[in-house]
Image (cartoon, grey):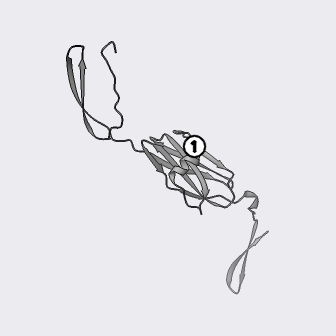
């Protein structure tokens, strides 16, 4: 530029590698000078992904994701009896989560008393990571749960004590 400053960005460099950079300036008639700079690229950032199931009900579940260096996160909930698909399938066909969100994600429309698996995949820093599948079982519908009232009775016969419970 007019002030004699230029910015150059080198891409495709290997992580943790030393490079020699030579900068030279030239005017119309001759080479005006050069500088040599030695630089080392930083280690590649590591993609991290943690998943925590917060709550499971009879028809829904909530989970939270904690990630570092992720550019995209997606999840799928499927029956536990099915084989987990490849991470690329989850990224392409799963539900996307806002990266960096601390809010829990709610999954609804699940069936009562079924075993499921939660699959979460993150992509970023040139890597793709799939968290360990989280297995969970939905609870029974509260309408199916019968509460019992009990009456206890205590007695003695032939020198032995016994207890009985009556349900009604």
Percent coordinates x, y for residue 130 in the rendering: 49, 51
Quarter of the image for residue 142 reads: bottom right
- Farthest residue toward the front? 29
Quarter of the image for residue 95 reads: top right
The N terminus lies in quadrant:
top left
Relative height, residue 78 to residue 150 (above, below): above
In this rendered view, identify the residue nearer to me: 16 or 151: 16
Q: Residue at x 33, y 12 (%)?
A: 2
Residue 63 visible in the current orientation: no
Percent coordinates x, y for residue 106 in the rendering: 63, 46
Disc 1 designates what residue? 96
Task: Describe residue 28's horizontal placement relative to residue 92 as left or right.
Answer: left
Q: Residue at x 51, y 54 (%)?
A: 86
Relative height, residue 73 to residue 1 (above, below): below
Q: Residue at x 25, y 38 (%)?
A: 18
Percent coordinates x, y for residue 88 in the rendering: 51, 50
């Amino acid at each position: 530029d007019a002030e004699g400053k230029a910015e150059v960005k080198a891409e495709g460099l290997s992580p943790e590698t030393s490079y020699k950079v030579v900068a030279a300036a030239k005017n119309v008639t001759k080479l005006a000078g050069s500088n040599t700079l030695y630089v080392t690229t930083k280690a590649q950032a590591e993609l991290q992904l943690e998943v925590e199931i917060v709550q499971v009900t009879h028809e829904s579940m909530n989970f939270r994701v904690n990630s570092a260096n992720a550019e995209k996160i997606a999840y799928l909930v499927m029956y536990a009896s099915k084989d987990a698909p490849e991470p690329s399938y989850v990224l392409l066909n799963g539900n996307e989560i806002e990266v960096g969100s601390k809010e829990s994600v709610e999954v609804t429309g699940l069936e009562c008393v079924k075993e499921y698996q939660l699959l979460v995949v993150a992509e970023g820093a040139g890597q793709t990571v799939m968290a360990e599948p989280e297995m969970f079982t939905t609870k029974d519908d509260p309408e199916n749960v019968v509460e019992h009232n009990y009456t206890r009775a205590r007695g003695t016969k032939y020198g032995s004590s016994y207890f009985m419970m009556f349900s009604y």
